[in-house]
Each structure stands twice: as structure tokens, then as C-alpha cells.
Image (cartoon, rainbow, N blue to C red):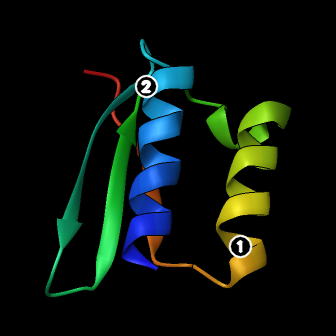
Amino acid sequence: MEKCVKDVISYLMVRFPENIRDYYYDEEADIYIVEHNIPDLLEDDEFQEIVYSNLFDNEIYNVLFEYNSD
């Protein structure tokens, strides 16, 4: 599971280089947090396809996409 999550996040960072800023793993919460600067990122069709087909379809839900405009 960890490799799948890291692969997807790495791909997103390559595909959206100006928008995916960083990511980190919060051990206490057992969740990956991906920082981005696109207010409507979750409405982007390409983004949704990548996330849904690679994470959610594999029942991986511990990834949080957090908007950060700074």
C-alpha cells in the first residue's frame, strides 16, 4: 500500500509540477497529506481519474489533499 501511495503522489508531482507542492506522512494519524495550490483540484477530471483509479479503486483512503495557497 505505501508504495502505491508514494507512486501516485510522485506521479501527481510530475504531472502537476506547479501545483502539487509537497507531501508528508503523519504517523500519528496514519495519513499522507498532499499540499496543493489549486482551489478546484478535486474537480479536475484528470486528477480524479488518477486518484480514483489508483487509490480509491484499491481501497486506499488514507490520503488527504490539502489546499495551501501560500
User: Residue drawn at (42%, 40%), measured in percent from left and top?
Assistant: 10
Q: Is residue 13 above or below residue 8?
A: above
Query: What's the CA distance linking mark 2 and mark 1?
Result: 22 Å
Give the residue type that dot 1 points to: Phe
Q: Is residue 59 left or right of residue 64?
A: right
In the picture, residue 3 is in which quadrant? bottom left
Q: Residue tagged by mark 2?
A: 37
Residue nearest the viewer, comparing 70 with 19? 19
- In the rendered image, the quadrant that contains the C terminus is top left
Q: Residue tagged by mark 1?
A: 56
Q: Residues within 10 Å of mark 2 (few under 14, many from 20)?
A: some
Q: Is residue 64 left or right of residue 69?
A: right
Is residue 44 shown to the viewer in this render?
Answer: no
Q: Horizontal and vertical percent for residue 5?
A: 46, 64
Q: Is residue 7 above or below residue 18?
A: below
Give the residue type that dot 2 points to: Asn
Of the numbered discs 2 and 1, the one sitting upstream in the chain is: 2
